[in-house]
Image (spheres, helix red, strand yellow):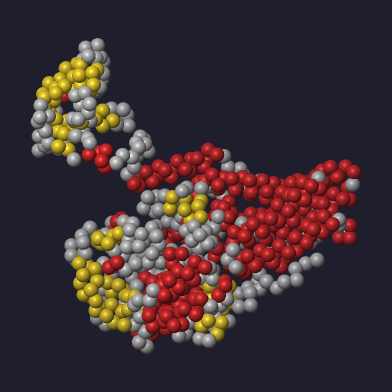
Amino acid sequence: MGSTFTYKHPKRLMMTSALPYANGQIHIGHIAGAYLPGDIRARFERMAGSEIVWVCGSDEHGAAITLRAKKDGVTPREIVDRYHIEMQQAFQGLDMSFDHYSRTSSDRHHKVAQAFFMKLLDQGSFEVKTEAQFYDPEANQFLADRYITGTCPKCESPGAFGDQCEKCGSTLSPTELIEPKSTLSGATPILKDTTLWYLPMGRHENWLKPYIESGELDGHTHHASDAWKAHVTGQCRSWIESGLQSRAMTRDLDWGVPVPVEGAEGKVLYVWLDAPIGYITATMEWAEKNGAQWEDWWQSPETELIHFIGKDNIVFHCLIFPILLKEHGDYILPSNVPANAFMNLEGDKISTSRNWAVWVNEFLEEFPGKSDELRYVLTSIMPEQKDSEFTWADYRERVNNELADVLGNFVNRVLVLTKKYYDSSVPAVEVSDFTSGDLEVVNQLESAPQKIADCIRKNRYRDALQEAMSIARLGNKYMTEQEPWKVQKTDPDRTRIILNLCIQVTANCAVLLEPFLPKTASKIQRAFGIESASWDSAKPIMVPAETKLGELPILFEKIEESTVQAQVEKLESAKAQATGARSDCQPLKEIMTFEDFQKLDLRVGEVVACERVPKADKLLQLTIRTGLDERTVLSGIAEHFSPEEVVGRRVTLLANLAPRKIRGIESQGMVLMAETAEGELRFVTPEEGTNAGDVIR
């Protein structure tokens, strides 16, 4: 019994994951979008014996970096140096197995990107245009896309950037924004002429459409069209059918890869030309360290190029970068771009500005040694076709009910019973003694590697993980039904078969779960004497008889409800602090209409006299001049103010409240007060310059 499949990929695989902006921390949405799927695929392909290189790196140019630098009062270099390290720590903590991690601010990358640009320039790939661009008259500089915000013309949400609306995901141009504002000064930008180099994307519609829709390129089948996700091809088709517009490949900025043309001082390469070339630079660096030829990975038809990204980067990786590669002429184009959708958090969109995120480095610090748990949950809910949602309650449930109760419990029972009955040595068995139930387990072990491999190569990582976990469930079910602890009393030979098969199931789990749970798989492999965990090694009989099994601590500790509740409270507190909201505020009352509000007659009043109400500890009797009359108003503020402190104050008065008798005194209105979190009262005092009788609107 054993595998009859060859898992090695027939071509080299050049894999990239989106270069993260070096202007902030890595959160779980980033991981689930572009990095965890890449890591699962890379780990599997290495186990399958495929030739593969997986690169990534820090995207250290563009307006987002300079905006963060201005906000923090430091240089762009200080920002990228800081986050280049922090992002690598997050990736390492979650065991992202990049073959090489680079950065785009390196001298080498500048030279590679400039050489790429110059070749396209020399062969006429660009149009040079002098056109009006947004300019900040107060900051005295042209505004890059991210320096401009306004209302999105597509979804009408405020706060959209000049290149993209983060609310609806639409790609924009600055001039499309409604009521644009400069993020530098808040000024309304003006249009001013500048000279830039444009990529005339409309020239490429004829070959892009069949390339995206059917995989055809230059008369040949470049890739299997059904392998591309529907939302990827759909977004690209929409762009092409709308007519591709020329896009500027340079920007007026002082941070980035300088445009290597005389007279282009103060201009840099557009980040979406610069950053993807970072994949090539990273491969060059990897090849130099490993004695390889980088050209084999980017310029050979024997190589497939795969980009792992989030859905907000589809246009850049499926249209703009392929155009640039084809225009250059020496490069292969991507055979697949398996973009994932977004991951939301506790019923809301992840937001760095509102601090509504689970930051990877914070998670690793608060949950040491739990990286596999997070990998498992994120894979289980990976947003492969549509947006998904992470909640701490679901995190706890999956860790406790699936990892701990299914996988961890099964592995522990196998080791405990093997130690008890056979002194931790694998019992010998004869396959000829297997029952039909035993053979059904064998059949499922035989088919599992291919099923999981197929899912992974189709970028169905949720399904792949469930197929792998089904082997642990198979073992649990088999052991529970066979009850070896009972059978041992009457049929010891049968117990040997049961436990041998349970050991083989566990060993298969140790291999088949490695792309998803690398730390856990490694622990199980060591305990079960598995020295070489290739994908081919997963088969019904993996662990030979007489193999001495080791011991394992509890693989997964159960999570208490209080632990996840603390994380939810931490989120709420962080969002409140970021947005200026207060966690101790009373909830909003029922919404009223504008017509209801118009009924309120709010006026400035002046207190001309005040005295205590007899036999009432809380009431003061105020005489208030309203501009129309003088009237009596009772107010429950005696515990906070003496009559002497009230006389002479200007107050906010609700003047048309129906009169009401209190302690035999008719009160003709209400003085508005503010109550602090500590329960103290403060007057809502009109500003200086207002007079009694002025209407408050």
Q: What residue is drawn where x is 33% and y is 40%? A: 591
- Above or below, 41 relative to 12: above
Q: Residue furthest top?
A: 615
- Foreground residue among 291 and 66: 66
Q: Quadrant of the N terminus?
A: bottom right
In the image: residue 117, left or right of residue 408: left
Query: Which quadrant of the structure image shows residue 6?
Result: bottom right
- Above or below, 148 relative to 472: below
Q: Quadrant of the C terminus?
A: top left
Q: What residue is drawn where x is 38% and y is 76%? A: 243
Query: Which quadrant of the structure image shows residue 393?
Result: top right
Residue 210, percent across and down?
49, 80
Q: Residue furthest bottom?
A: 123
Q: What residue is drawn where x is 33% and y is 70%? A: 256
- Foreground residue among 645 and 655: 655
Residue 619, percent across and down?
23, 19
- Foreground residue among 87 and 6: 6
Residue 68 makes an appearance in the image: no
